[in-house]
Image (cartoon, rainbow, N blue to C red):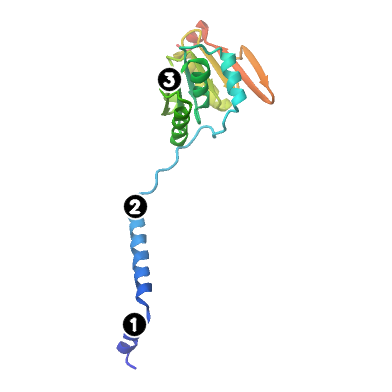
Amino acid sequence: MTPARSLQMSRTAVPPSLRLLAALLLALLLALAGRPAAAQAPALDVPYVPTPQPVVDKMLELAAVKPGEVLYDLGCGDGRVVITAARKHGATGVGIDLNPERIAEANANAKAAGVTERVKFMVGNLFEADVSKADVVTLYLLPDVNRKLRPQLWKQLKVGARVVSHDFDMGPEWPPERTERLDYKTIYYWTIKPEHKQAAR
């Protein structure tokens, strides 16, 4: 048998269906190779851990949130603090989070709660946020993030604005005015005073 004859027989021995499958796989691999790499997930300063609803209620109670006040939740996650402030206290609220998935979830939750006209959620960096309109700022971050935020809060917030943090304080530079315990959770409370504004200049 000649080499040419052998090559012809080997080609005909492969079923057309297998040749088609091989061609499709090759096309798929070439298409994937030409696609841009998927966008990387944002590097988060704080892992997402939802605040239990009883803690949310206690934070808002401690902050004495009133109808018409503006609340900012930094690292808002699924939006439950802002949504509760709007639904139960008549406040308006803004939630900021670095993760687009959490913001999408927060918007869906606001729609389900019927408060979309009083709340707003946005993807953003906490350290670049403008919170100057806030009457209340809520946090569930980490100790080092809280301390890094402290000068920003002193500079931007007006005198009398309240800050409430779940589980983590602001370090010795800003001792809490009140501390509340709820089961195994701790809630810290501060107000902005004139001396904080002076220190931030």
Residue 35: mark in rendering: 2
Residue 196, compared with residue 6, is above or below; it is above
Residue 20, compared with residue 125, is above or below; it is below
Tell me which residue sits at (42%, 14%) in the image: 133
Q: Give the camera-side residue of 99 and 78.
A: 78
Q: Please tell me which of labels 3 and 2 falls first in the chain.
A: 2
Q: Are marks 3 and 2 in contact (CB under 8 Å)?
A: no
Identified by mark 2, the residue type is Arg
Corner quadrant of residue 25: bottom left
Location of mark 1 (residue): 12
CA–CA distance between discs 1 and 2?
35 Å
SS type, badge 3: loop
Residue 60 in sight from this viewpoint? yes
Task: Say whether residue 68 is left or right of residue 181.
Answer: left
Residue 173 in sight from this viewpoint? no
Tell me which residue sits at (36%, 60%) in the image: 28
**Closer to the observer: label 3 or label 2?**
3
Residue 118: mark in rendering: 3
Residue 131: mark in rendering: none
Q: Give the camera-side residue of 42 and 11.
A: 11
SS type, badge 2: loop
Identified by mark 3, the residue type is Arg
Task: Say whether residue 102 is left or right of residue 20.
Answer: right
Across and down, in percent, residue 171 comes to 60, 20
Identified by mark 1, the residue type is Thr
Residue 3, compared with residue 161, is above or below; it is below
Across and down, in percent, residue 111 comes to 44, 28
Corner quadrant of residue 24: bottom left
